[in-house]
Amino acid sequence: MIQYASIILIMLGLYGLLTNRNVIKIIISLNVFEIGLNLFIISVGYVDGGLAPILTGNSTSVLSFVDPLPHALVLTSIVIGVGTTALGLAFAKKIYAKYGTYEIDEMGVE
């Protein structure tokens, strides 16, 4: 079920990236796309009824462990996403200072 929600978020973010002409809305669409992608990666590593991947003396099947790698990748992706958003907003501030608008269509080419 969560995979469907993540695919909807990915498609919504992709639609926003392709249709918006406002720099701020493009940055927001990129964040929505990223959240959907992170949610999808986490849902791939989930095992229903799974245990934390800590080996103990009990004999437990390896198939019942939750894969920790997707969670680590998503943590890294969140940090990269924050940096990308900050850089995009800094660029948007410079664009507004130079052109006086966030609309891509209204920016004159010099």
Image: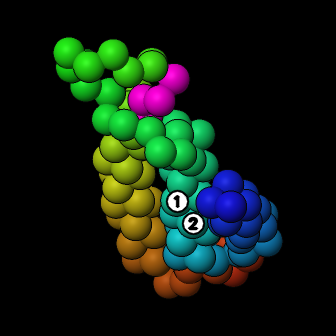
Q: Which residues are magenta?
A: 63-67
- Kindly identify which residue carries mark 1: 35
> Residue 11: image x %, image y %?
75, 62
- Kindly identify which residue carries mark 2: 32
Residue furthest bottom as drawn: 100
Q: Residue at x 55, y 83 (%)?
A: 101
Looking at the rendered image, the quarter that the C terminus falls into is bottom right
Give the vertical position of 24 relative to 57 (above or below): below
> Residue 79: image x %, image y %?
32, 47
Q: Are marks 2 and 1 in contact (CB under 8 Å)?
A: yes
Q: Residue at x 25, y 25 (%)?
A: 54
Judge whether residue 16 can be spotted in this image. yes
Residue furthest left as drawn: 57
**Secondary-structure class at tag 2:** helix
Q: Decide which of 61, 19 is in the foreground and name it.
A: 61
Q: Relative to residue 27, is residue 81 drawn left or right?
A: left
